[in-house]
Amino acid sequence: MRFELATAPGDPERPNEDWASVALPAAGQGGALVLLDGVTPPAGDYACVHSVPWFTARLGGALLELSASRRDLTLAEVLAEAIRRTADAHRDTCDLSHVRTPQATVVLARWGTDEIEHLVLSDSALLLESPDGTVRAVLDDRLDRVPPEVLASLVATDALRNAEGGFFTAAADPAVAGLAVTGVTARAQVRSMAALSDGASRWVDMFGEGDWAECVGVLRKEGAQGLIDRVRTRERGETASPLMRRWKRHDDAAVVFVEL
C-alpha cells in the first residue's frame, strides 16, 4: 500500500486553507483519508474570530478520528458529528448563522478488507481507479450548475450558499451531511484513489491538460507534488486567460493519492 500527500498555498504570503490526512488503523486491514478545501471569505465579510485554517484543522481532525475509530457510523454520520463538534468549539464566540461562517468542501474515503465507502461535498474531487485503469470521478456538481453570471456576484452566490436549489459546504449545520454524494464500492474493484481540492483538479477541469485517467497516471509517475507543480506551471502561463480573471490565478492545492 502506498500513500502520497502534498499541499501548497496559492499565495506564500497567506496561510494554506486546505487540509489533508490519512489514517491507518492498527489492525492493518483498512484506513481512511480526509481532504478539506477551506472557503476563503471576501475581505471584510467575516463573522468568526477564528481563521479558516483553524476551522479546517478542527473539522479535519474530527473527521479523521471519527472515520478511523467509529466504523459503526456511516460517513454521512461521521461528517455530521464532526461538524457538530467543530461548531460547539466556537458557537459561544462566533455567529454561526452568518452565511460566511467558516466552511469547507469535503472528501472522505474509508476502506476495509471488502469495500470502500466515499463521501464528497462541494467541488473537491475523489477519483477511483479500477484494476483495468478506468477512472471514475466522484463529484458533487451543484456548484458547477450555478450560472457564471451568478457566481460573478457575491450577493447572488451567497443567496445559494447552503440553500435549497444552490450548493452546499460543511459549515455549522450538521444536516448538510445528508446532502453529500455518498456510495460504496467493492475494494476488489479499486486499484487506487485520489482526493483533489479544486486547486489541484484544475489540471483537468480548468486547463484540460488531460482526463481523469491521465491525472491518475501523473500521480502514479510523478507523485502528488508533481501534479501540483504541473498546475502551477500552467497557471503561470495563463495570465490573460478569462478563467484566470474569473478565478484565483493560484489557489491552495491539496492531493492525497492511495494505491491499495
Image (cartoon, rainbow, N blue to C red):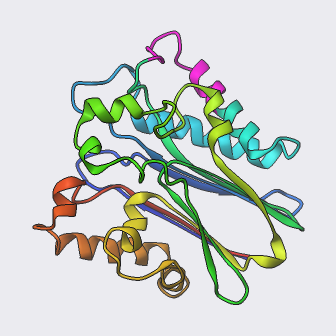
Quadrant occupied by the C terminus: bottom right
Work out whether residue 243 or residue 50 is closer to the camera in this orientation and state it.
243
Does the segment drawn in magenta span residue 92? yes
The answer to whether residue 201 is left or right of residue 70 is: left
Q: Position of residue 67 (x, y in %)?
A: 75, 47
Picture layout, residue 30 above or below residue 2: above
Q: Quadrant of residue 129?
A: bottom right
| Residue at 53% from the left image edge and 14% from the top image edge | 91
Q: Position of residue 6 (x, y in %)?
A: 48, 65
| Residue at 48% from the left image edge and 18% from the top image edge | 96
| Residue at 42% from the left image edge and 75% from the top image edge | 227
Q: Position of residue 200 (x, y in %)?
A: 41, 65
Quadrant occupied by the N terminus: bottom right
The answer to whether residue 121 is left or right of residue 75 is: left
Q: Quadrant of residue 186?
A: bottom right
Picture layout, residue 105 above or below residue 241: above
Q: Main secondary structure of the magenta part?
A: loop
Which region of the structure is painted magenta?
Answer: 83-97
Work out whether residue 152 or residue 29 is closer to the camera in this orientation and state it.
152
The answer to whether residue 238 is left or right of residue 94 is: left
In the rendered image, the residue lying farthest to the left is: 240
| Residue at 38% from the left image edge and 71% from the top image edge | 228
